[in-house]
Amino acid sequence: MGKVFEVKNLSFQYPKSKDLVIKNISFDVEEGKIVGLLGPSGAGKSTTQKILTKLLSDYQGEILYFGKDLKTYKKDFYEEIGVGFEMPVHFNKLTALENMKYFAQLYKKNINYMELFEKVNLSDAINQSVGEFSKGMKVRLNFIRALLNDPKVLFLDEPTNGLDPTNARIIKDLILEFKKQNKTVFITTHLMGDVEQLCDEVIFITKGEIVEASTPRELKLKYGKKEVKIEYKENGSDLTEKNFALEKLGENKEFLELIKNKNIETIHSGETSLENIFIKVTGEEVL
Ligand SMILES: Nc1ncnc2c1ncn2[C@@H]1O[C@H](COP(=O)(O)OP(=O)(O)OP(=O)(O)O)[C@@H](O)[C@H]1O
Ligand SMILES: [Mg+2]
């Protein structure tokens, strides 16, 4: 599998900022994967995304895109990537359809966006001006816009922010559909549920530095407890809870007795949630 991005010792400072906002970070993005860049507000997620999409160019370090220095790519780069911005700007006086027609003609290749309007439940609103759209409608429109040129790499900044669970699910399914075509997604989010459902790899960033990077599964094993928690009821009594180590569980007499003879209510493995991992590695609460 090829590497879409190889980021080596990347540092960045905004002209007006006192300190580095990105501090010597290195990571790879593999083709066909969904990679999540996670971290608290102000960590540098959007800045990193802006650097990878060539919106900010004055960085230190090296970035390779499909093995070639990102700086050598010109306008054609934008034919290959799709970007869902954190704060999208649309023409508010134009309708949703007029907006998409406008943005679509900026590219050589176009996806069938009428089909996408259908998929994200916006078909009935295509002739409504975007200024009258609710936040969730704008977010869905923004998602279509990111796909207009049928990109091979998709950048999404908080793609389900402001969506109800049904529409969030639709967007997540479309992201997974995109990945199935061996395409790559670089996503930033605060929502650990989204990460759980989408990401193959996660990179945690705090104050411009990478503090952890792995797969969600590996992280859960690393930060979780290797144990199982059983809740059971005895002769109509109150709920009792007991923890057992996973190691040699099949030989643990007390455990075997318990599952054989007691009225088991729940069994949970001691794996931790990504929420807890986020708090542990970034030192901050999930927003
Ligand atoms: N144009 C700018 N000029 C100066 N500083 C900036 C600029 N944009 C962002 N910053 C600063 O860079 C740091 C990282 O910002 P960035 O937007 O990348 O964070 P983020 O991780 O995306 O946060 P959020 O989760 O709130 O979107 C912050 O301290 C921010 O104040
Ligand atoms: Mg951001």
Image (tube, rainbow, N blue to C red):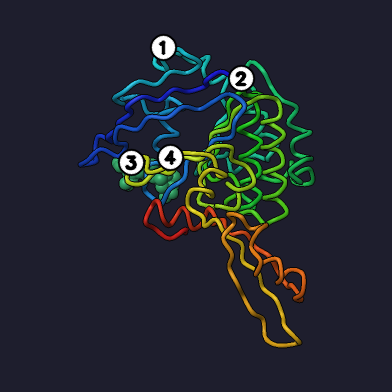
Q: Which residue is mark 2?
A: 107
Separation of marks 4 and 1 at Cα, in angstroms: 22 Å
Real-space CA distance between mark 3 and mark 2, rounded to the nearest whole angstrom: 33 Å
Q: Is residue 264 left or right of residue 248?
A: right
Using the rendered view, name the quadrant where residue 174 is placed.
top right
Proximity of marks 1 and 3: CB atoms separated by less than 8 Å: no
Residue 46 is tagged as: 4
Mark 4, secondary structure of its residue? helix
Give neighbour class at mark 3: few <14, some 14-19, many 20+ (Cα, 10 Å). many
Position in image of residue 137 (x %, y %): 66, 49
- Tag 3 or tag 4, which sits nearer the N-term? 4
Look at the numbered disc 3 and say if its residue's Cβ is closer than 8 Å to ligand 1.
yes
Image height check: is 220 above or below 249? above
- Specify which label sits upstream in the sequence, 1 or 3: 1
Do tag 4 and tag 2 residues touch (Cβ < 8 Å)? no
Residue at the spot of label 3: 208
Q: Which of marks 2 and 4 precedes in the sequence?
A: 4
Mark 3: amino acid:
Gly
Q: Assign ligand 2 to one image quadrant.
A: top left
Q: Secondary structure at mark 1?
A: helix
Q: CA distance from mark 1 to mark 2?
A: 20 Å
Mark 4 → mark 2, Cα distance in angstroms: 24 Å
Label 1 sits on residue: 72
Q: What residue type is disc 1 on?
A: Thr
Nearer to us: label 4 or label 3: 3
Q: In 3D space, how far apart are the residues under numbered discs 4 and 3 (Cα atoms)?
A: 11 Å
Q: CA distance from mark 1 to mark 3?
A: 25 Å
User: Residue drawn 59% across and 28% down?
Assistant: 184
Considering only order in the chain, which callout, 2 or 1, is on the residue closer to the N terminus? 1
